Structure formats: structure tokens, C-alpha cells
Image (tube, rainbow, N blue to C red):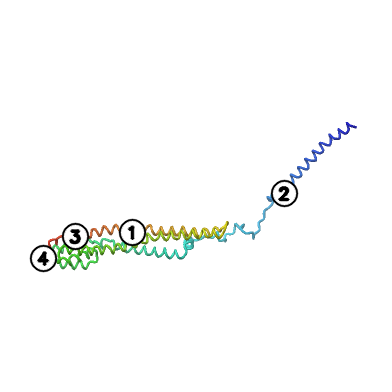
Amino acid sequence: MSVGKSVVRLLRLPCFALLASLMFSASAGAQDEDAMAEFGVDVAGGPTEVIVAENEPGVDAGDETTPAAKDQNLLSWVIKSLGWGYVFIFLALSISLVSLFVMNVLAARRDTLCPNELIENFEELLNEKQFQEAYDMARADESVLGKVLSAGLAKISRGYDKALEGMQEVGEEESMKLEHLLSYMALIGNLSPMIGLFGTVHGMISSFQVIAVGGASPKPAELASGISTALFTTLIGLAIAIPAIAAYNILRNRVSRLLLEVGVSSENLMSRFEDVQPKGAKK
């Protein structure tokens, strides 16, 4: 009897092991089926077809009529980013700069400041002792040199020193007019970056306001709007200021050089009157 019980116990052990293995494999297979079902795989016959609802938001990748897919014109984007206020300001500065540049280029010509033809004709009349004709010709000439020479001849009767003083006064007055006209270009060159900096601060404040109001998830489009305003105002402000400052310095140097030639030429032409004394003065 003891031997029979032992044999029965030995036979039970493989049965229990086989039963346990069958239960484990069944549970593992059930888990694999659940996992594959989550990923859309059909256990019986392969992968299942994933059907996306047509009205599901954010999945319509083939729709080309969405606002994000539309082509936006660069000019309209710039105007929208700047706003009409900045557009009018920068447009006014640009038109003013172009107008001032043309006016200063015309004023900085040699024919306007120190024409060679006037020098030759004036000297020829002085050599022929035709002082009244020389005075009339200089007075009729609209150049700076003509105004300086006419002022000197008008006071030559009061002495050479008085004539030089009159020439210097007219030369300084004309130089001041030219400098004033040039200074407006420098003003635009200094003002444009400041307006661009103002727009930069304005745009960044708008972006931070979106972050403060929107919380942890602000809308990227609203953030991009403020940043676009900041960048475009800075860009256009510098685009106006750089040529304005460059043109101002180039034209100022040209005007200074031509005015120096006016002074030298006028003194050389009037140097023959150095011995002229005021009327009534003793020699």
C-alpha cells in the first residue's frame, strides 16, 4: 500500500506542472491579444484597417483650403505685422528722405555753388576794368559764388577789409542754409532707429501680454504677431536710417569742399583790390 501511494504522488506532480503551464500560456496569450488589439492588429488575420472619421478635427491633412495652407503675400504680411500706424510713419519718413536727398544733390552741384564759367568771365571783366559789368554779372548769378562776389563788390568802396567782411557774412549765411537742409537728413537717420526701437518694445510687450493672459498654453499665432511687429519695425527703421546717415555724410563733405573752393576763389578774384582804401581816407 505504501508503494502504491508513492507511485500515485509521483504521477500527480507532472500533472500539476502540465496544468500550470497550460494556464500560464493561456493567460499570456490573452494579454498578447489585448495588446495587439490596442494597436489595431487583428489577431485572426493581420492588421486591421484604421478608419479616420472625416469630421475629426485636426486630421484633415489633405484639405488644401485651410488657412494655414494658404499662401500669404509678403507685402500684406508686413503691413499686417506693422499696423497702419507704423506704415504711415515709415512711409512719411521714406518720402521725406527721398525728397531731401534730391534737393541736397541739386544744391551740392558745382554749378550751384562754384561754377567755373562765372570765375572765368568775372576775372576777364576785372582784367578789362569793367567793374560795373562784373558786379551786374555776379549779382545776376544765383550761385553761392555769385552772391559772395556781388556782396564784396558792393562794399569795395568802403575798403578791402569791409569787402572781405561782407563776403564772409554772405558765405556763412549760404553755408548755414545748406547745413540746415542737410541736417534734416541726419534727423531722419537718427529718428528712424528710435521709432524701430519703440516698435520693438511695443511688439515684445504684446507677446508677453499674450503669455500672461493665455496661461501655460498661449496661442503661437498671437505670439508670432507681436514678435513680427518687433522685428519688422526694427528692420524698416534701420533700412531707412542707414542710407540716410550715409547720404548725409557724403553730401556734407561735398558741400564743405565746394564752399571752401568758393572762399578761396572769391578771395583770389578780389585780391586785386587789396590797395583800395575807403573813400575819404588818407593815403
Spatial CA distance of label 2 from label 4 is 126 Å
Q: Which residue in the structure is indicated by mark 1?
A: 248
Q: Position of residue 120 (x, y in %)?
A: 19, 61
Looking at the rendered structure, the secondary structure element under dot 2 is helix
Q: How dense is the environment of label 3, judged by Cα within 10 Å: few (below 14), some, or many (20 and up)?
A: some
- What residue do we see at 9% from left, 64% from top? 282
The disc at residue 281 is: 4
* Residue that carries the numbered disc 2 in the rendered image: 34
Q: Is residue 9 left or right of residue 230?
A: right
Earlier in the chain: of badge 2 and badge 1, it is 2
Three-letter amino acid code of the residue under disc 3:
Glu
Identify the secondary structure beneath mark 4.
Answer: loop
Using a 10 Å C-alpha cutoff, classify the residue at mark 4 as few (fewer than 14 neighbours), some (14 to 19) or many (20 or more).
Answer: few
Residue that lies at the very extreme toward the right in this rendered image:
1
Residue marked by disc 3 = 267
Mark 2 belongs to which amino acid? Asp
Q: Quadrant of residue 7?
A: top right
Quick one: label 4 or label 3, which is nearer the N terminus? 3
